Image: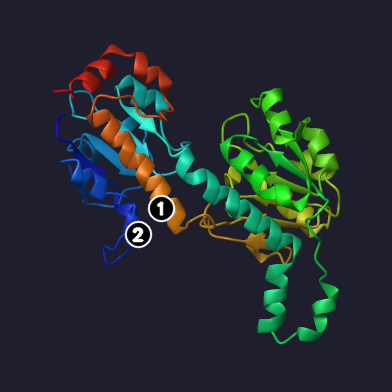
């Protein structure tokens, strides 16, 4: 095995250079004989000189663009994304330069599913409103903010992949009916999960709560638009812990202001921090794209990233490569084989 030099993006650190994520399993790299270090600077997008010193890079926030690689400049064999989203990664550019990109679905699925359930319960129970009643000494108004029980309602999932399926399991003890809209979910899998697959329009019309669990792609951008919101029940709520641009945020602001839907719970936004005015509405429960940030996610995502680096260092294909075309490229195959003794 060739010893790897691994870079870790600096956005994991706070102003005192402490890793705010805690244990992300970097000690496993040291134990396996590899060296690692934090990149010397914080960047919004990687430049070739940021990536060139490393055989592998673990990163969270920085984007990977067409300008992140330069012909003739060394580049990593693997970029391990700490999370499941990769909409800020130029996959074609990575593939063209024989760089594998991995994500961490196993590490994120339960924390994100738990975050979705947490937000759903908070919104249905009017937790944010009731918190304000106590802080603002408005105790007598508590009977004006009755919550909606979860048991027996219909929950519609936009996306029934790994994380959506985990949420189905978490919802099971509440006795809810679950609808799903996901063109990639096989019917037999939906049946095993007791999820009824329906059209986008039917999901909007029948659900008491709509939960967005899909990945952001060109096909899912603004999937929840003005027409979708207009089809929802006025008593229904919308939860989004996936990616902000899946929801047309301006349309959502209009629907909430007009009372066309009851409430929303958002951990993600079209722009972050939000600029649409949604943060000013009283019938919205908000989190700063951090509701799933727990010690469980730290260890899970970190362990998955580290395993991807170790796999490549030992000449194996990592489990969660998203630019699968790279695996067929002779250049990547040669770089993978070069790690072997």
| Residue drawn at (83%, 57%) of the image | 259
Answer above or below: position of 338 versus 23: above
Q: State the residue position of label 2.
A: 22
Coordinates of residue 118 in the picture (x, y in percent): 63, 58
Residue 274 relative to residue 147: left or right: left
Q: Residue at x 62, y 29 (%)?
A: 219
Pick the front one: 219 or 55:
55
Q: Residue at x 56, y 32 (%)?
A: 217
CB atoms at circles 1 and 2 under 8 Å apart? yes
Residue at point 32%, 63% (across, down): 14
Is 246 above or below relative to 123? above
What residue did someone put label 1 on? 298
Residue 54 visible within the image:
yes
Number of numbered discs on residues: 2
Picture quarter containing residue 243? top right
Q: Earlier in the sequence, mark 1 or mark 2?
A: 2
Q: Quadrant of the C terminus?
A: top left
Percent across and percent down for residue 301 are 41, 46
């Amino acid at each position: 095995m060739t010893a790897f030099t691994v870079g870790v993006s600096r956005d994991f650190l706070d102003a005192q250079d402490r890793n705010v994520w805690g244990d992300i399993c970097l000690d496993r790299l040291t134990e396996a004989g590899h060296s690692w270090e934090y990149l010397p600077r914080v960047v919004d997008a990687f430049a070739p000189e940021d990536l060139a010193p490393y055989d592998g890079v673990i990163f969270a926030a920085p984007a990977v663009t067409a300008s992140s690689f330069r012909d003739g400049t060394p580049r990593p064999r693997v970029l391990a994304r700490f999370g499941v989203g990769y909409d800020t990664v130029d996959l074609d550019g990575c593939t063209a330069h024989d760089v594998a990109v991995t994500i961490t679905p196993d590490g994120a699925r339960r924390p994100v599913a738990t975050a979705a359930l947490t937000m759903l319960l908070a919104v249905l129970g009017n937790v944010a409103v009731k918190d304000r009643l106590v802080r603002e000494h408005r105790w007598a108004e508590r009977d004006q903010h009755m919550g909606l029980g979860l048991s027996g309602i219909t929950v519609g999932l936009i996306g029934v992949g790994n994380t959506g399926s985990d949420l189905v399991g978490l919802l099971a003890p509440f006795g809810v009916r679950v609808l799903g809209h996901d063109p990639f979910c096989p019917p037999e899998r939906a049946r095993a999960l007791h999820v009824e697959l329906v059209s986008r329009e039917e999901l909007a019309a029948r659900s008491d709560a709509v939960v967005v669990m899909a990945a952001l792609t060109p096909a899912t951008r603004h999937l929840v638009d003005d027409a979708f919101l207009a089809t929802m029940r006025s008593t229904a709520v919308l939860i989004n812990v996936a990616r902000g641009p899946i929801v047309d945020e301006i349309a959502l602001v209009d629907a909430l202001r007009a009372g066309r839907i009851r409430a929303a719970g958002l951990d993600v936004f079209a722009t972050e921090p939000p600029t649409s005015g949604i943060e000013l509405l009283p019938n919205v429960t908000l989190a700063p794209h951090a509701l799933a940030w727990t010690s469980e996610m730290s260890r899970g995502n970190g362990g998955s990233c580290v395993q991807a680096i170790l796999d490549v260092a030992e000449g194996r294909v990592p489990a969660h490569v998203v630019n699968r075309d790279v695996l067929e490229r002779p250049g990547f195959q040669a770089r993978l084989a070069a790690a072997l003794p």
